[in-house]
Amino acid sequence: MDSFFFNITDTSYKVDYLYQNKDDYIKRVDISNGIVFFDIHLDSHTEKTFDVKNLDRMVAIPVTKLGSFQVKDNISDKVYDVKQNSINIFTSSRQDLKLTINESDATEIFVLFIADFILKRYLSSNKNEVIDFLYTNIQEDVSCDLIDNKPIDALSLYIIDKIIKSKDENTMAGIKCEHNILEFMIHHFNLLDMLESELSDDEVCISRSCKDILLRSFTKPPSIETLSHLCATNESKLKKVFKKAYKTTIYTYIQKLRLEKANFLLKEQYLNIGEIAKEVGYKHQGHFSKLFFEHYGVYPKDLLKK
């Protein structure tokens, strides 16, 4: 079986067409030995199927803007349905997969494949870090696992657009593309909440209860006093346990949830910046824009243009 990843010889940016017919295409782009993406753009079409066979352990992140597809694990015979408007994370260490793009009026899919030796560069020796967790997962005998599923957000589309257009750069396309891919990985991995494992049963209960309440009420969160009562603890213990579990304060976590929600709303493009700010709990548009830039490195108005 050939390696899926080692396809680069004397170039740092290699493009192969798995399918091409006029404006329709399924394009494979090798950025380096270890980072590959598929750029799929199809207008009205019948079902299309192709295989992914690989010797290497990997993480795959499909971003399905339009259309849908299936991932069949040929080892376990399990089938995953990947729907429109979703970002998923799959892990695999025994790759014998079949991808089937479903018949549709239009399909736009981006799939990023990352080899384990790329992840290994960024390990932190903390098993609760997302990259460490993913790397450890694919060192096991995993045929194909679905790790996460989320709706598409505006910033992800913005970064993917930069990745796909990297080839248009006159110089250092490979380096610029890899930089954008790392930016995408950082952003998307930050959306995963990893719970600290060294917690007592009581601390797990308190931290999860607090998180669940905040997920439902972050635009108008309860006071710390009220929150502590709802979690059956006192204010001091609540703040201490929450920070131990999620490596952040309750206030910072609320801000993170608000900005993530704004990021999703920007993708829909039916509200203006001021309306989005109010929707996620900010009274002033300028303050919201400043916080969004500090968190994501781009102003919300730039995402709204997309």
Image (cartoon, rainbow, N blue to C red):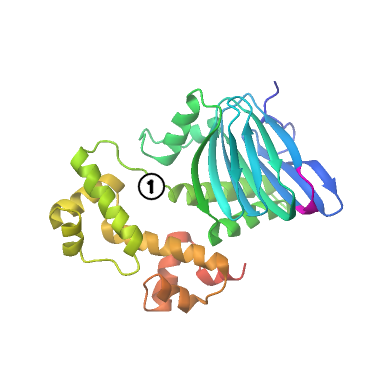
Q: Quadrant of the N terminus?
A: top right
Farthest-out residue, top: 1
Residue 254 in percent (x, y) is at 33, 61
Farthest-out residue, right: 22
Quick check: can you spot residue 169? no
Drawn side of residue 281 relative to residue 179, left or right: left
Residue 228 in percent (x, y) is at 17, 58
Drawn side of residue 49 relative to residue 150, left or right: right
Residue 170 in percent (x, y) is at 74, 54
Drawn side of residue 246 relative to residue 138, left or right: left
Q: Is residue 237 magenta?
A: no
Relative vertical location of residue 270 with respect to residue 208 in this rendering, above or below: below
Q: Amino acid at mark 1?
A: Asp
Please tell me which residue lies in front, 126 or 166.
Answer: 126
Identify the residue at horizontal 56%, vertical 65% (top origin). Answer: 267
Question: Where is mark 1, residue-wise?
Answer: 193
Drawn side of residue 121 relative to residue 238, left or right: right
Please tell me which residue lies in front, 218 or 245.
Answer: 218
User: What is the secondary structure assignment of the residue under circle 1?
Assistant: loop
Stretch in magenta: 42-47
Relative vertical location of residue 300 with respect to residue 211 in this rendering, above or below: below
Please tell me which residue lies in front, 60 or 160.
Answer: 60
